[in-house]
Image: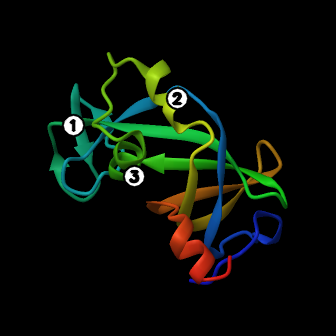
Amino acid sequence: VSRKNVSELQDGESAEIFGTVVQVFDPRFYNACPECNRKPEMDDNKFKCPEHGVVSVRRVPILNFFFDDGTGNVRTVCFSEQANQLAGKELTEDGDFEAIKDELLGKQLILIGRAVSNKMFGRTEFIVRSVKEANPVELVQNDV
């Protein structure tokens, strides 16, 4: 994937973006299939995954934040492992999120993911596949 400015992101495009976390929201959680992470449907008081049948669900975090690179900002979404990696620990529903939010604000990151159009809100959002803390020495060497 190529590095893009936030202002250049197009719907459906995979990209790498470099910027700063400027706002963090409390994590939310959903029920997921332990095999494929898809959201199973409730059927006859049992959770059923379309691919794996009846499953015992696990709670998966979703962490949303705004990310700014100086050309624009984008609402960014981290699921599961990426959310835990960004938080620096496994997120739980009974956790203290204020300390995590305080630590994330102002953090410079390199994110790899995909831009998607949120038609309900009329904006582009970024779904993260990979999170890496920005290293100033590497950034200078790569002439960001």
Please state if 11 lies on the left or on the right of 60 as rendered. right
Residue 119, horizontal then vertical, whole percent: 77, 51
Q: Nearer the viewer, residue 10 or 6?
A: 6
Q: Nearer the viewer, residue 28 or 56?
A: 28
Q: Nearer the viewer, residue 75 or 106?
A: 106
Q: Name which quarter of the figure residue 88 lies in.
A: top left
Amino acid type, mark 2: Lys
In this rendering, which labeled residue sits more in front, label 3 or label 2? 2
Up/down of 84 relative to 16, above or below = above
Amino acid type, mark 1: Val
Amino acid type, mark 3: Gln
Please state if 61 lies on the left or on the right of 23 as rendered. left
Residue where numbered disc 2 is placed:
101
Q: Residue at x 67, y 61 (%)?
A: 116
Q: Earlier in the sequence, mark 3 or mark 1?
A: 1
Which circle marks residue 57 in the picture?
Answer: 1
Q: CA distance from mark 3 to mark 1?
A: 19 Å
Q: Tell me the quadrant of the picture where the C terminus can be found.
A: bottom right
Which circle marks residue 96 in the picture?
Answer: none
Helix, strand or loop status at disc 2: helix
Q: Residue at x 15, y 37 (%)?
A: 56
Q: Residue at x 76, y 43 (%)?
A: 120
Please state if 135 lies on the left or on the right of 122 as rendered. left
Q: Earlier in the sequence, mark 2 or mark 1?
A: 1
